Image (cartoon, helix red, strand yellow):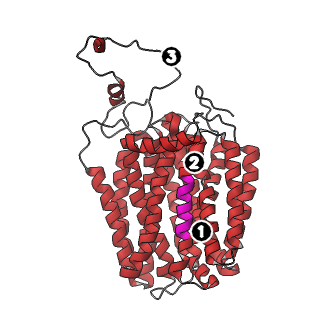
């Protein structure tokens, strides 16, 4: 299967499932250290706060990988690029599992984060292989794979870590990633990259797009705020559950994460709703849901059965709000420039994971100063900031709808792509030369955007 700039090849169901599995494995590598940080602390003889540096380093490495490597998805053929990324990630996870001390583990975790960006290469590739009115649904399916990887990774790592020690999850993840690299080498469809720009230009273009595209900036703010709160909760949840309030093992964290499997059913539905109604309504519902989740989670500080019930319901609400909001944000972002989806995703996901890394760091420090309720207050403040931006009056120049390049309607404003021609039109000039019309070129292979 090959796609070019002039022809779109529809993804088959089997291919979508393979890509969703790739997302699951890649994303799982970012999240499983969250559930075993207390085991790492005990195994290496450091404090739990110090062991949480592994989580932060992995997320920082992931952010760096998205900025430095994901733009190459617009420049390199996807199949060899993904296979190499997964192979390097497998080697990094193997090194982490053999780490003799915390500094080596932090370094190996950071390198694993840099290379495990396959999901962020898959999403723009898939967006270019489906029609605009199917994009939300396919993004929802891929995101379901990512959610499954996130949830199962926490449960898998906490259970395996309790049985065999903290090294076992890293070694098992290494084997799984290397096996997947072999599967993709044989089954992934061939694609033709849309850009021949040099690497430096690709990096600069990600920053330029962030500066010039208001829809991209808005999506980045929403995702960074919500993901920062999400990371703060899950980084500190292990400290709460294994602390004096509950006195449980790390397996309890994995079981709480497993409850979030409901989100795997919600994201395809969210994608279909975004396809029909645009992303803005979905963003409003999700940001409001984060505020509600923060209030419910705060009751978990009391401990006991009521507290555990509050943690279960609150983390489920938070997971659903984050993931459904991600579907809306990605649908908006991928409609901005079809020829630059890798660079757009680089800017978007870099901002998201900078927010996530900051959330992990702030969460641990807030937990030390104000306990679990302080962490929940942090989540609420971040969501309130994003919601305030969402409810702010629109700018003078209205934005085009967030989903679909040429699909009428589907947005809260009811506008089609009207603003774009106004931006492309030559401005009026007092001189006679400025009043001449430029001939309209028809049949061009470029969109002009």
Q: Quadrant of the C terminus?
A: top left
Q: How many C-alpha atoms fall within 10 Å of the one at disc 2: few (<14), some, or many (≥20)?
A: many
Q: Of discs 2 and 3, which sits in the foreground?
A: 2
Q: Which residue is mark 2?
A: 70
Secondary structure predominantly adopted by residues drawn in magenta:
helix
Foreground: 308 or 365? 365
Cβ–Cβ below 8 Å for labels 1 and 3? no
Q: How many C-alpha atoms fall within 10 Å of the one at disc 1: few (<14), some, or many (≥20)?
A: many
Residues at marks 1 and 2, CA–CA distance in whole angstroms: 22 Å
Residues at marks 2 and 3, CA–CA distance in whole angstroms: 31 Å
Could you say where residue 30 lies in the image, as x and y percent from the top left?
58, 63
Is residue 58 inside the magenta stretch? yes
Q: Is 138 rendered above or below residue 447?
A: below
Q: Is 287 rendered above or below residue 301?
A: above
Cβ–Cβ below 8 Å for labels 2 and 3? no
Residues at marks 1 and 3, CA–CA distance in whole angstroms: 50 Å
Q: Which residue is mark 1?
A: 32
Secondary structure state at the residue bearing disc 2: helix
Could you say where residue 151 lies in the image, as x and y percent from the top left?
56, 65
Q: How many C-alpha atoms fall within 10 Å of the one at disc 3: few (<14), some, or many (≥20)?
A: few
Secondary structure state at the residue bearing disc 1: helix
Cβ–Cβ below 8 Å for labels 1 and 2? no
Q: Could you tell which of marks 1 and 3 lies nearer the N-terminus? A: 1
Q: What span is in magenta?
A: 55-66
Q: Residue at position x 63%, y 62% from top?
A: 112
Q: Residue at position x 51%, y 43% from top?
A: 343
Q: Could you tell which of marks 1 and 2 lies nearer the N-terminus? A: 1
Q: Which residue is mark 3?
A: 443
């Amino acid at each position: 299967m090959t796609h070019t700039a002039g022809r779109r090849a529809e993804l088959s169901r089997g291919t979508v499932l393979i890509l969703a599995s790739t997302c699951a494995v890649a994303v799982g590598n970012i999240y499983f250290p969250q559930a075993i940080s207390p085991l790492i602390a005990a195994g290496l003889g450091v404090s739990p706060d110090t062991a949480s540096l592994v989580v932060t380093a992995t997320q920082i490495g992931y952010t760096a990988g998205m900025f430095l490597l994901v733009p190459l998805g617009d420049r390199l053929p996807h199949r060899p690029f993904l296979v190499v990324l997964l192979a390097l990630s497998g080697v990094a996870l193997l090194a982490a599992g053999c780490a003799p001390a915390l500094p080596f583990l932090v370094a190996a975790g950071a390198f694993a984060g840099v290379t495990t960006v396959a999901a962020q290469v898959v999403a723009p590739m898939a967006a270019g292989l489906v029609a605009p009115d199917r994009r939300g649904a396919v993004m929802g399916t891929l995101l379901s794979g990512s959610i499954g990887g996130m949830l199962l990774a926490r449960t898998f790592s906490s259970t395996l870590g309790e049985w065999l020690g903290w090294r076992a999850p890293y070694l098992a993840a290494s084997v799984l990633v290397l096996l997947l690299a072999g599967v993709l080498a044989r089954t992934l469809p061939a694609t033709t990259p849309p850009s021949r720009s040099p690497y430096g230009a690709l990096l600069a273009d990600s920053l330029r797009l962030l500066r010039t595209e208001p829809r991209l900036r808005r999506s980045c703010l929403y995702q960074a705020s919500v993901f920062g709160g999400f990371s703060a909760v899950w980084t500190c949840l292990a400290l709460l559950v294994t602390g004096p309030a509950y006195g449980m093992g790390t397996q309890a964290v994995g079981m709480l994460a497993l409850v979030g499997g409901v989100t795997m059913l919600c994201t395809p539905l969210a994608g279909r709703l975004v396809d029909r109604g645009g992303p803005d309504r979905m963003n409003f519902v999700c940001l409001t849901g984060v505020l509600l989740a923060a209030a419910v989670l705060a009751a978990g500080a009391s401990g006991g059965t009521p507290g555990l019930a509050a943690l279960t319901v609150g983390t489920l609400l938070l997971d659903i709000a984050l993931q459904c909001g991600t579907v809306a944000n990605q649908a908006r972002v991928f409609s901005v420039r079809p020829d630059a989806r890798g660079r757009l995703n680089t800017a978007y996901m870099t901002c998201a994971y900078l927010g996530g890394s900051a959330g992990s760091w702030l969460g641990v420090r807030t937990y030390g100063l104000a306990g679990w309720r302080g962490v929940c207050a942090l989540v609420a403040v971040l969501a309130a900031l994003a919601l305030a931006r969402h409810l702010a009056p629109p700018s003078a120049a209205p934005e085009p709808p967030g989903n679909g390049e040429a699909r009428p309607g589907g947005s809260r404003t009811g506008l089609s792509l009207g603003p774009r021609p106004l931006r492309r039109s030559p401005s009026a000039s007092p001189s006679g030369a400025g009043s001449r019309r430029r001939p309209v070129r028809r049949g061009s292979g470029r969109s002009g955007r």
